[in-house]
Image (cartoon, rainbow, N blue to C red):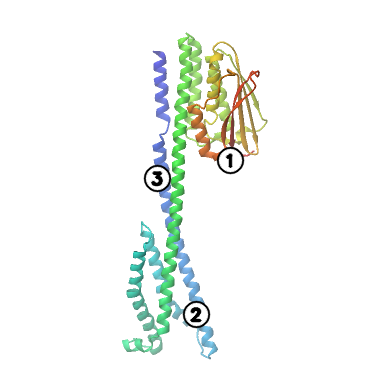
Amino acid sequence: MHLSLSRGKLWLSFIAYSPTPMQASFDQSQLTIARDTDCSKKGLLRSIVIVWLLWTVLLFLATFANLYDLRNVGVSVNIQRQLFKFFVILVPWPLLSTGLMLYFSTLRSGIRWQLALKIFTVLMLVFLPVHIIYEHAFLAFRINKREPSWDDIVQILSPMQIWVDVMVLLFTLSAHLAFSYWQRSRQQLMIASQSRQDVLALKLMQLRSHLEPYFLFSSLEGIENLLINAEGPMATRALARLSDLLRYVLESSQETEISIDNEIRFIRDYLNLQNLRFADRLQTEWVLEERDWSAHQIPPLLLYPLFDYAVRNMQADLQRTSGQLRVQASVVQNVLHLSLDFGADPEQLPVMTEELQAAQQRIALLQGKDAAIRFVRHAASDALAHGVTLDFPLSELSDA
C-alpha cells in the first residue's frame, strides 16, 4: 500500500514537471517561424537597397561616359544637367527591379516557365512601350523646351535606343529570375536542413523520454525489493535519496547539456541508492583523470544506461555476496573515454539491452560514428570479467 502511494506520487511529479516533446517542438517551431520571417524581411530590404545602389553606379557610369563623348566632339556640357538627364531616363529601371523583387517575394511556389513567359509578355507589351514614350518625350522636351507632341516624339525616335531598352529589359528580367531561382533554392535547402534538425531533435527527445521513466521504474524496483524484505528504514532512506535523484532528472530535462561533474555526482548518488538495495555489498572504485570535469559538457543522463547495465548484470551475485565495479574516465583529444568493469558470470554473454540501444542511437544522432558504446570481455580468471565502454566527442567550447 505504501509503495503504491509512493510510486503514484513520484510518477505524478515526474509527469507534472517534465515538458512533453510535442510542447517543446511547438515552442521551437514558433520561434523558428518568427525568426525566419524577420530574416526574410531584412533580406528583402537589403536586396532592394543593393539593387538601387547598382542602378546608381550605372547612372554615374552612363553620365560620365556620355560626358566624355560630348566633350571629345567639342560640346560644352554641365555635369549636373547630365546627371539629372540620366536620372530621369533611368529611374523607371530601379522601380521595375523593386516591383519585380516585391512580386517574386510574394510567390509561395517557384517561378515556372509559364509565369516567366507571362511576365516577359506584360513587360514587352506594357512597360517597354510606356518607357520608350516616356524616355523620348523627356528628350524632346529638353530639345524643344516645350511640351512635346507626338510628332516631336516620333521625330527623335531612335531605333538604337529602342534596341538598347529591349536589351536592358531582357537583362533586368533575366537577372531577377536568376536571383529569385537562386534564393528559392537556398530557402529550400535551409528548410530541408531545418526539417532534418527538427526530426533529429524529436528523435533525441523520444530517446531521452524513454530513459527518464526507465530510471524511475528501475529505482522504484529496488525500493520495492527493500519493502518486500521488510527493510523499512532502508526503504525510507532510499525514497529520500530517490527524491534528490528525481530532482536532478527534472532539472536536467530543461537542458540540452550539463557538466560531467554534475553527471558523475548524479551517478554516485544512483549507485549509493542501489547500494542500499544490496545492503552495502556494491563496492565501487572510481579512477578519474585529474582535471576540471565541470569544464566539459555532455547531454543529461548520457552515462546512466551504462551503470544500470552493469548493476543489472551484477544483480544475481549481489544478492548473496559483494561485487566490485571499477569506473575509469579520461579525456583524450577532446573525446570522453568511460569504461566500466564489473564482476559477473564469466560464461554470460553481453546483451545489448533496450536501454543501451536507445543510448547508442542517441549518441549516434548527436555525434555520428565518432561516438560508440562497446562491450569488453576480460579473461575468465579476472574478477572483473565484463566491461562496457563509452567514447563520446566533447564540444570544442567545453575543452578545458
Q: Position of 118 compared to 216: left or right?
A: left
- Establish if 296 lies above or below 225: below
Instruction: State the residue position of label 2.
Output: 63
Q: Earlier in the sequence, mark 1 or mark 2?
A: 2
Quarter in which the C terminus is drawn:
top right
Number of on-image labels: 3
Query: Alpha-carbon distance for marks 3 and 1?
Result: 27 Å
Q: Secondary structure at mark 1?
A: loop
Q: Earlier in the sequence, mark 3 or mark 1?
A: 3
- Establish if 43 lies above or below 227: below
Q: Are marks 3 and 1 in contact (CB under 8 Å)?
A: no
What amino acid type should be assigned to the residue bearing mark 2? Thr
Residue 183 spot, x, y in % from top left: 44, 59
Residue 88 appears in view? no
What amino acid type should be assigned to the residue bearing mark 3? Gln
Q: Position of 135 compared to 242: left or right?
A: left
Q: Earlier in the sequence, mark 2 or mark 3?
A: 3
Instruction: State the residue position of label 3.
Output: 30
Query: Alpha-carbon distance for marks 1 and 2?
Result: 56 Å
Quarter in which the N terminus is drawn:
top left
Q: Are marks 2 and 3 in contact (CB under 8 Å)?
A: no
Residue 260 spot, x, y in % from top left: 58, 32
Q: Quadrant of residue 29?
A: top left
Q: Residue at x 36, y 80 (%)?
A: 134
Disc 3 vs disc 1: which is toward the camera? Answer: 1
Instruction: State the residue position of label 1.
Output: 395
Q: Position of 216 compared to 268: left or right?
A: left
